Image: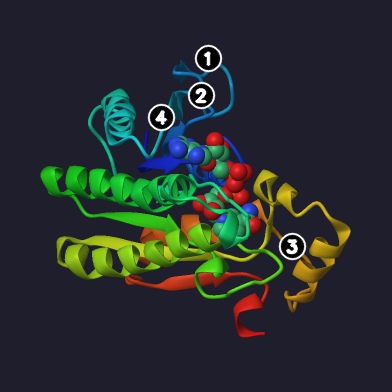
Amino acid sequence: MTGRVIAVTGGGSGIGAAVVRLLLDRGDAVIDLDLAHPREETLAEGAPGAERVHRARCDVSDVESLAAALDAGIARFEGRFDGLVHCAGIYLKSPTEDVDLGTWNRVLDINLGGSFAAASLAGNRLIAAGRPGSIVLVSSTAAFLGDRAEPSAGYAASKGGVVSLGRQLAVEWGHRGIRTNVVVPGVIDTPMTTVIEHPEAFAHVLASIPLGRLGSADEVAQVCVFLGSPEAGFVNGAVVPVDGGQLVS
Ligand SMILES: NC(=O)c1ccc[n+]([C@@H]2O[C@H](COP(=O)([O-])OP(=O)(O)OC[C@H]3O[C@@H](n4cnc5c(N)ncnc54)[C@H](O)[C@@H]3O)[C@@H](O)[C@H]2O)c1
């Protein structure tokens, strides 16, 4: 195996699944972690890239479950580990007056707590091994834009926190050769956006995107994979929109 070993959370769907595919295409090995995966699975021999995928179930808001799944993957690849692309997350659209503290906490626990858990576990393992590496976190344009028609205060706050977390880690761990960058997707065509089912809501969303269409999971994954790769070796602390121009319109 000549490539790197990269952990991907949320690898079971959408952007995370596209990241897994691209990493395998590059020749990297992937520790593919998702709440929707079976408990632990070694892909069938003969499946494309099977020997380079360790797939396991874990909940990113449960640090013990995440640590166990990550460490099992690192052990499978004989202690090698080079970085993280953290995609796991949930969306919740609801007027703020209908959101109770339990719901708010759940969104924050998964989206922001999960980002901290994944990034700190990955960073600690790189530091302990004395290795350089890279961390890519996934925020959202919701971190920067309010939206009266698509209210999602908890989601927006969690994704704002992800930006701050990524920038802090870039400064704290840069001197160790650990780069941290944040990708900011706009509206991307994945199972997450099927919540925008109403034609009027969909038209409203399209009107906010200068390119006039949704992005694809692959278009976001390409940027995640680039930022995590050696080709982006001097990129650290960047916050990169992949949004068809939504943030500048
Ligand atoms: N789709 C968009 O328009 C969009 C826009 C901006 C940001 N994002 C962000 O991109 C990331 C990926 O979203 P997507 O569109 O691919 O969504 P998706 O729903 O297709 O995939 C999310 C994946 O995360 C997993 N997941 C959810 N909670 C988990 C948990 N607690 N532990 C482990 N895995 C968990 C799900 O099982 C799923 O496989 C998310 O962080 C999302 O907030 C998406």
Please give the residue where the numbered disc 3 appears in the rendered image.
Answer: 214
Mark 4 residue's CB less than 8 Å from ligand 1: yes
Compared to residue 181, the image places residue 53 above or below, namely above
Residue 7 appears in the rendering: yes
Q: Are marks 2 and 1 in contact (CB under 8 Å)?
A: yes
Compared to residue 245, the image places residue 5 above or below, namely above
Classify mark 3: residues with Cα within 10 Å, few (<14), some (14-19) or many (20+).
some
| Kind of residue sitting beneath label 1 | Glu
Q: Nearer the viewer, mark 3 or mark 1?
A: 3
What coloring was used for the rendering? rainbow
| Kind of residue sitting beneath label 4 | Cys
Please give the residue where the numbered disc 1 appears in the rendered image.
Answer: 45
**N-term mark: 2 or 1:** 1
Measuring from the top left, give residue 80's x and y in whole percent.
26, 36
**N-term mark: 2 or 4:** 2
Classify mark 2: residues with Cα within 10 Å, few (<14), some (14-19) or many (20+).
some
Please give the residue where the numbered disc 4 appears in the rendered image.
Answer: 58
